[in-house]
């Protein structure tokens, strides 16, 4: 016949009150929120340039200084905070279409070239 071993388990259950369970859940939630907030705050707000936009910038010999990029970046993130998803950015030397949602420059053209263009699918304009 088969032999079975029997082991005794202590019968002292650990009972936690609802308030203890809630405080642990809240502490876990607050910690994960804190972590998320901290990582979001440390992420630098930087615009990316799509492959297409990069090609256009090079083809059209458009030069934008670091300071100008910083102004564009700041304004795009400000527009995004106000609900703008795809702004047209008009600069002295260039016009950019930006996806504020993805923080990506979609296309670029010289400002003189932009005079004869019709811009569609934009929901805001930033004039610098």
Image (tube, grey):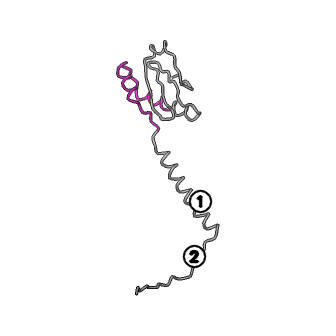
- Residue farthest to the right, as pictured: 18
* Residue located 50% across and 52% down the image: 35
Q: Hey, which quadrant is residue 113 in on the image?
A: top left
For marks 2 and 1 on the same chain, the one whose residue lies earlier in the sequence? 2
Magenta span includes 5: no
Q: Which label was assigned to residue 118?
A: none
Along the line of sight, the residue nearer the viewer: 30 or 86: 86
Q: What kind of element bears circle 1?
A: helix
Taking the spot 54% from the left edge, 31% from the top edge, the residue there is 85
Q: Which residue is mark 1?
A: 26
In the picture of the structure, the residue carrying the numbered disc 2 is 14
Q: Main secondary structure of the magenta part?
A: helix
Query: Is 69 rendered above or below residue 33?
Result: above
Please determine whether, in this image, residue 64 is positioned above or below residue 5: above
Q: Where residue 117 sits: x, y (%)? A: 49, 15
Residue 106 location, x and y as percent?
A: 44, 27
The segment highlighted magenta reads 45-74
């Amino acid at each position: 016949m088969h032999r079975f071993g029997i082991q005794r388990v202590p019968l002292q259950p650990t009972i936690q009150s609802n308030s203890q369970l809630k405080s642990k859940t809240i502490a876990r939630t607050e910690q994960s929120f804190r972590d998320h907030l901290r990582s979001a705050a440390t992420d630098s707000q930087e615009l990316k340039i799509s492959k297409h936009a990069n090609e256009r910038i090079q083809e059209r010999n458009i030069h934008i200084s670091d300071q100008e990029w910083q102004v564009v970046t700041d304004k795009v993130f400000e527009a995004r905070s106000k609900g703008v998803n795809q702004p047209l950015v008009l600069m002295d030397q260039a016009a950019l279409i930006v996806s504020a949602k993805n923080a990506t420059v979609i296309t670029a053209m010289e400002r003189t070239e932009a005079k004869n263009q019709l811009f569609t699918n934009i929901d805001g304009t930033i004039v610098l």
